[in-house]
Structure formats: structure tokens, C-alpha cells
Image (tube, helix red, strand yellow):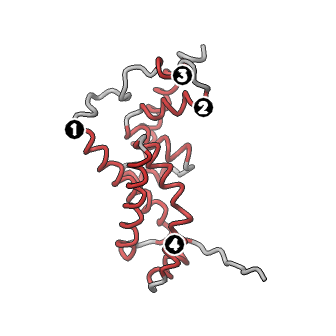
Amino acid sequence: MQKEFAVRTDTELIQLLHQGDRQAFADLYEHHKSAIFRYCQRMLNDSGAAEDATQETFIKMYANIRLLQKTESFLSWLFSIARNEVMMHIRKQRRNGAQGNDDVWDETTPYELMVSAETKEIVQRLLQNLKSEYREVLLLREYEQLSYAQIAEITSNTESSVKSRLFKARKALTQRLKQYYQ
């Protein structure tokens, strides 16, 4: 005999979690871990660091779930926690001298790295070389399909700031892609 499982919404799972249901946490983790890991991986370009950031995100989510005011904002709140973890890691890199100037790109030219790459690999490399504040909004919008309002909430910025960063990131990517597709 097959067991039937009811699919629960985040709101229902959060209510169960407030009541001490540990399975609700496991369900929330299973439902959102892939998206959070993808975001962390693309932001950090390091699987190990992304795994750590993902784990820390869910630990902090569990510890602070009672602070969540509106359960319908759960996904934005969760991505905000993940963003804080990513930014902490990036700040540590900057303190160690890994990043510097005000240019949009971390590397001066990724051309040598991508000459033989396929289109998908080229785009992935270019995304990895965008500075974190530009890469972040682009990833949240294009890969996670979040609204401008959700991205603004996650990044603690205004919608106009999010739109501006998206514009700059897309323009920068377009300029670099022209090198390959003229």
C-alpha cells in the first residue's frame, strides 16, 4: 500500500514549525535548499563555501523563524538570510585583498578563459566575473524569477536601485558578449 503525502504550503509548514514540528523544518529545507544553494554557488563561485552558506542560512532560519512577521514573505526572508551569509563571505574575501576597484567586473578580461567554451559556459563565466552586487540582482531576477519587489526586499534596496543594477549588469554582459558574437 502506498502512503499518500499532502503537499503543504510554506505558510502551513511555518505554522507547524511554530508548534514544534521538526518534520516541517525538514520539508521547508527540502523544498528550498536547491534554490538557496544555486544562489550561493553562483554568488560565491565556490561549492564548498556555497554549501556552508546554505547550511548557515537554514540554521539561522530555524533559529529566527519566530521573528518572521508575514509568512507570505518567507521566500524573500530566506533569500535575505542567504544573502547575508554570502555577503559575509565576500567581505572576508575583500579583507584578504581579493577584490578592489569600482569597476563592474572582478577580472579585467575573461576572454582567454572562454575562447573555446560553448555559449552556456561563456555566460556562466561572465556571470561569475560580475561583481557581487550586480551578479546578485541578475541571478535573483533571471534564474530565480523573483519580482523587483522581492529582490528589493532581499537586498534591502529600493526597486529603482534593483532596476538600475539590473540595467548595468545586463549592459555589461551585452558588451562582453559582443566580443564573442559579432
Amino acid found under the numbered disc labelled 1: Asn
Amino acid found under the numbered disc labelled 4: Ala
Residue at the image point whose x is 44% and y is 46% from the top: 47
Q: Secondary structure at mark 4?
A: helix
Residue at the image point whose x is 44% and y is 31% from the top: 168
Q: Is residue 31 above or below residue 82?
A: below
The spot of residue 32 in percent (x, y) is: 53, 61
Q: Is residue 165 above or below residue 85?
A: above
Q: Nearer the viewer, mark 1 or mark 3?
A: 1
| Closer to the camera in the image, 18 or 164 | 18
Circle 1/circle 3 CB separation < 8 Å: no
Circle 1/circle 2 CB separation < 8 Å: no
Q: Nearer the viewer, mark 3 or mark 4?
A: 4
Q: Earlier in the sequence, mark 1 or mark 4?
A: 4
Which quadrant of the figure contains the N terminus? bottom right
Q: Give neighbour class at mark 1: few <14, some 14-19, many 20+ (Cα, 10 Å).
A: few
- Residue at the right extreme of this rendering: 1
Circle 2/circle 3 CB separation < 8 Å: no
Q: Which numbered disc covers residue 96?
A: 1
Amino acid found under the numbered disc labelled 2: Lys
Q: Earlier in the sequence, mark 4 or mark 2?
A: 4
In which image quadrant can residue 44 be found?
top left
Q: CA distance from mark 2 to mark 3?
A: 11 Å
Where does label 2 land, which residue? 120
